[in-house]
Image (cartoon, grey):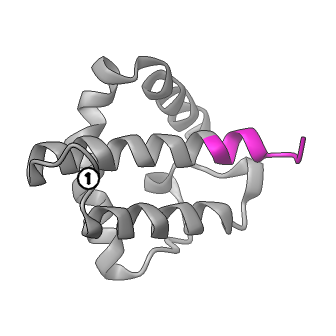
Amino acid sequence: MIPGYFIMDRETKTVQLMIELFCRDHHNREVPCESCRELADYAEKRIAECPFGEDKPTCGDCTIHCFKPEMRVRIRDVMRYAGPLMIWRHPLLAIDHLRKKMQNRH
């Protein structure tokens, strides 16, 4: 297995699920709309190209901010909405994200 592959895959999966939750509740779609798919594809590409690799911090704690300003606003809206829902919908991913966030702060 490529080092960091699991971590990056988990990050991508978490973002994809958050975008799906946001789109379902804001755009009344069972599958992500074109705009949300565009955001998901963009986020996946940015995560895959993260210079931190397996040491990647949570995006909110990152010092680089590799998202374009427009996409950063969009993903921030998604995360603010879907983040609190993740603990109920996908508890293992949410707990892992919170653990990683706390770990980055030490």
- Residue 10 appears left or right of 75: right
The residue at the far front in this view is 30
- Residue type for callout 1: Val
Question: Which percent across, then down, holds residue 79?
Answer: 30, 48
Q: Secondary structure at mark 1?
A: helix
| Magenta-tinted stretch | 1-9
Relative to residue 90, is residue 33 depicted above or below? below
Image quadrant where one finds the N terminus: top right
- Residue 76 appears left or right of 66: left
- Residue 11 appears left or right of 43: right
Q: Quadrant of residue 18?
A: top left
Question: Which percent across, then down, holds residue 98?
Answer: 47, 29
Question: Which percent across, then down, holds residue 3?
Answer: 87, 46
Residue toward you, 62 or 22: 22
Per the image, the residue denoted by label 1 is: 78
Relative to residue 28, is residue 34 depicted above or below? below
Q: Residues within 10 Å of mark 1 (few under 14, many from 20)?
A: many
User: Would you say residue 102 sits in the magenta stretch?
Assistant: no
Residue drawn at 51 percent across, 37 percent down: 101
User: Would you say residue 2 sits in the magenta stretch?
Assistant: yes
Residue drawn at 64 percent across, 44 percent down: 9
Q: Quadrant of residue 70?
A: bottom left
Image quadrant where one finds the C terminus: top right
